[in-house]
Amino acid sequence: MVERLSHGPASVHRLTEPFALSQQMISKHVAYLVRARIVIKTKRGRESVCTLRPEAIKTVSEWAFSYRRFWEESLDKLQEVVKQMKKEEAEDDQ
Amino acid sequence: MTNNKVNEPERMVVTRVFDAPRELVWKAWTEPKYVMQWWGPKGFTCPACEIDFRVGGKSLLCMKTPDGQEGWNAVEYHEIVLHEKIVSSMYFSDSKGNKIEPEELGLQDEAIDGAYDVTLFEDLGNGQTRLTLVGNEPMGSAKESGQFEGWVETLDKIAAVVAELRAVPQ
């Protein structure tokens, strides 16, 4: 959906087309993106038009702040640190 | 749409087994010298780390994105059981440790009010340690509605989108 919006603003109806989901489900997803401030929703006549907020996307991507991802990737690094510490300790013991 | 009523929200749990004794993992987890080497996602660095590791103490950590943007987190400690358990709460902050609401950063606030992060260190024998992180983020409702997957997927795609946005002048 974000990919679609990167090509330009689109109505909720338009956004529903490529997905095998009901408009209700799409609206829910859009609401989620709006809440996360990734998408701005405006009214044009009877239709709701969705526009990407590039600044927001930039913020989110740079933070990549999925809580889980944050920890998984930090732990990957921690694993390396611990490995190194263990090696140094072994060397000290010699 | 079903309305799921969950009394005790499912928490985010991350576990990792380290091929090292518990004391060592604890040290890597709590001493600034080591924390600075692992804090933050892939590609991020940690240019600043102040740790006041005691109950009631507060730590301040900085992570720097690959293109130089800095983000700060503060951690407060509520319970510490040496080499076993840390109960803490983490939040976004400014460089002085003042709390910043996630919304201000364009992030969704997913924390459960009054819930803490719990970090457990288990000795598995054979020089192995299992680290378990129980986050204060509710997983249940988001997962059931499919929003969680959607969110993860969104994040996965965002990098490509940003590259595209950057390539096309606004």
Image (cartoon, coloured by chain):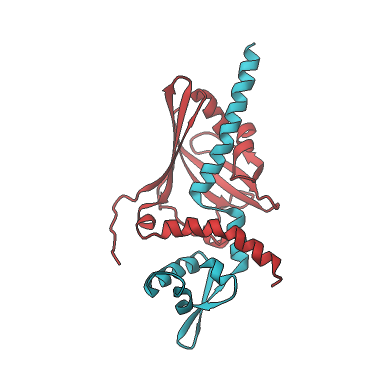
Chain colours: A cyan, B red
On the picture, is B163 further left or further right than B83? right
Q: How many marks?
A: 0
Q: For the point 42% across and 72% down, which residue is it?
A: A27
Determine whether A22 is above or below B65 in the image: below
Residue at 38% x, 55% y is B143
Q: Can you say whether A50 is above or below B41 in the image?
A: below
- Tell me the residue at 42%/24% (across/down): B124
Q: Position of residue B68 (x, y in %)?
A: 70, 52
B146 is higher (above) or lower (below) than A87 = below
User: Furthest residue to the bottom?
Assistant: A45
Q: Horizontal placement of A45 versus A62: left or right?
A: left
Q: What percent of the width, then of the height, locates residue B163?
A: 66, 61
Residue B94 appearing in the image: yes
Residue drawn at (59%, 41%) of the image: B39
The vertical placement of A43 against A55, above or below, is: below
List x then y, in percent, for residue B52: 57, 36
Instruction: Residue A87: name its quadrant.
Output: top right
Q: Residue A48's x, y, as percent?
A: 47, 80
Quadrant (top left/top right/bottom left/bottom right) for the N terminus of chain B: bottom left
